Image (tube, helix red, strand yellow):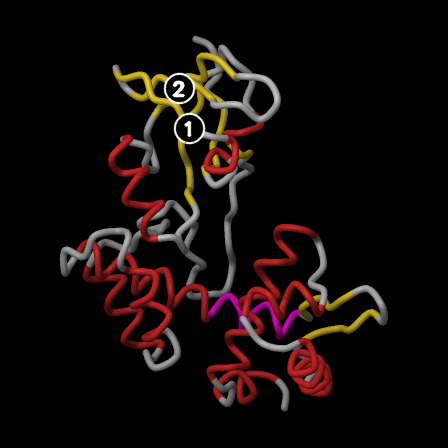
Amino acid sequence: MTGVKALKELTAPVEDYLKVIFELEAGVGIAGTNEIAAELGVAAPSVSGMIRRLADNGLIAHERYRGVRLTKAGRRAALKTIRRHRIIESYLTSALGYPWDRVHDEAERLEHAASDELIDRMAAAIGEPTTDPHGAPIPTREGTLDEPPVVPLAAIAAGKRVRVQRVGDRNAEQLRYLAELGITPGQKIEVLTRAPFDGPISLRVGRVVQSIGPALANQILVTPIRPE
């Protein structure tokens, strides 16, 4: 199974695996069996079987005792699925008025069924967005992805100003809480104080002072704002 024909034959489980491997690679550099199993909620032996299948089909390269990496074909397939997911999320919020805390699960259900033509029409209908509602960059039709450098808010020192670029999208309750705090993509934030020993982080969000914990701050990806 190779080339364009192969990409059309991918099943939903295969697409899910490739997407998870892509995300793990982006986070830690390589995807291990246990990490894949945890992300997908399946048993490790099931992952081992799928890894062999993906490797046989040229979608991943398996490094024994280390983990797996996507091949060029595997990365292209993963980006197609990620594009579908993020365009669907964007369409649901922009065209249908869905709140940002409900679109992830809907997109998970729809991403395997939507055709490329439908996704392209959705994108055109809402003005060709470059990021999804949570700030994640959307891959292009050609399979490229422009990911600007970001750092977790938890790593920002007191006294620094940043702009929110992206937030974690899997926890609906967390998204609702962030919206209440005004912490959404594009928002400017100033880190006021950081309590020691993983204590709370005090922030100025707009004109309001808020306080969050380091665990939540790790889910908020930002870019520094240079002093004028």
Q: Position of residue 213 (x, y in %)?
A: 47, 30
- Kindly identify which numbered label has been placed on residue 94: none
Q: Residues within 10 Å of mark 1 (few under 14, many from 20)?
A: some
Image point (27%, 38%), residue name? 179
- In what element is the residue under mark 2? strand
User: Range of the magenta residues?
Assistant: 72-80
Vertical side of 113 occupied by 123: above or below: above
Q: Is residue 109 left or right of residue 9?
A: left
Image quadrant of residue 93?
bottom left
The image quadrant that residue 119 belongs to is: bottom left
* Residue under numbered circle 1: 212
State which tag comes first along the sequence, 1 or 2: 2
Helix, strand or loop: magenta stretch: helix
Q: Is residue 169 magenta?
A: no
Callout 2 crowding tier (Cα within 10 Å): few <14, some 14–19, many ≥20 = many
Relative to 226, is 189 on the left or the right? left
User: Mark 2 — residue?
Assistant: 203
The amino acid marked with disc number 1 is Ile
Identity of the residue furthest to the right in this view: 64
Asked whether 79 falls inside the magenta stretch, the response is yes
Q: Position of residue 91 (x, y in %)?
A: 23, 61
Marks counted in the figure total 2
